[in-house]
Image (cartoon, rainbow, N blue to C red):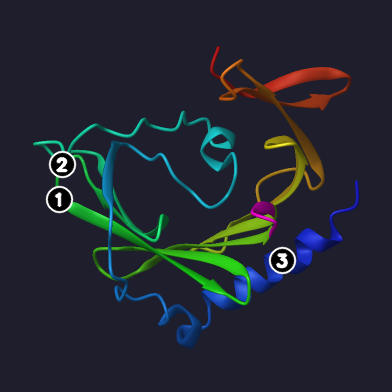
């Protein structure tokens, strides 16, 4: 499986996370409209990222919770998430993430309360769908993906990761309501699940 395009994207992400001028563009300057909450993460610019990490996306809460323990707070502007605040197990603000678009590419930068960079994400879009995406952590670990879509669903993902086999193809299966039921890859002709929500 060819993944040279993912190497280029990974190198771009590694360069940008080390660029102080670029990272300084992620500031809290947006005017917010709608705000919503979830108990745990429910949004990322990288399709299937939560599921590939073995995490079921949290459901949006009907109202602001009384306790902020392990809560994520999402700020929207014109229907797009522009900021996320994440609260820790004591209910204190521990991390925040800002979203920006530059030249048709969507970026998110997450920092902790000490202003240390935790990760940078890049998502390249075409007609509203992510074609390629990458996450680079502050310790320079990385995950890059190329997406193959079938309608509004990701059919398969080609991955390149600092801790995985380059070019691994991850296939997706869905429930009747279009939620992700399963992610798996083939190893020696056998299906190996990396996520199952059945």
| 64 with respect to 192 (left or right) | left
* Residue 72 circle label: none
Q: Secondary structure at mark 1?
A: loop
Query: Which of the labelled discs sits on residue 9, or is there none?
Result: 3
Image vertical order of residue 164 relative to residue 2, above or below: above
The image's mark for residue 68 is 2
Q: Residues within 10 Å of mark 3 (few under 14, many from 20)?
A: many
Task: Identify the residue shown where x is 55% and y is 33%.
Answer: 51
Give the main secondary structure of the magenta stretch: strand
Look at the picture and state if 171 lies above or below 198. below
**Mark 3 or 1 closer to N-term?**
3
Do callouts 2 and 1 mark residues in contact (Cβ within 8 Å)? yes
Q: Quadrant of residue 194?
A: top right
Magenta span of residues: 126-130
Q: Earlier in the sequence, mark 3 or mark 2?
A: 3
Q: Residue at x 74, y 36 (%)?
A: 151
Most extreme residue toward the top is 198
- Mark 3 and mark 2: Cα distance apart in space: 36 Å
């Amino acid at each position: 499986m060819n993944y040279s395009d993912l190497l280029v994207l990974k190198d771009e992400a590694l360069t940008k996370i080390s660029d102080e001028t670029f990272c300084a563009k992620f500031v809290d300057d947006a005017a917010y409209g709608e705000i919503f909450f979830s108990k745990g993460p429910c949004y990322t610019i990288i399709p299937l990222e939560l599921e590939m990490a073995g995490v079921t996306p949290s459901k949006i809460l009907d109202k602001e919770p009384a306790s902020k323990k392990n809560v994520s707070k999402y700020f929207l502007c014109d229907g797009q998430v522009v900021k996320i605040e994440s609260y820790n197990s004591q209910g204190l603000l521990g991390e925040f993430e800002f979203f920006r678009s530059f030249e048709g590419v969507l970026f998110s930068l997450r920092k902790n309360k000490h202003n240390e960079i935790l990760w940078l994400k890049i998502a390249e879009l075409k007609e509203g769908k992510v074609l390629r995406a990458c996450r680079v952590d502050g310790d320079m670990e990385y995950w890059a993906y190329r997406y193959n879509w079938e309608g509004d669903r990701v059919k398969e993902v080609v991955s390149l990761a600092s801790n995985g086999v380059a070019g691994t193809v991850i296939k997706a299966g869905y429930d009747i309501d279009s939620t992700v039921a399963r992610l798996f890859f083939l190893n020696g002709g056998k299906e190996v699940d990396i996520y199952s929500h059945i």
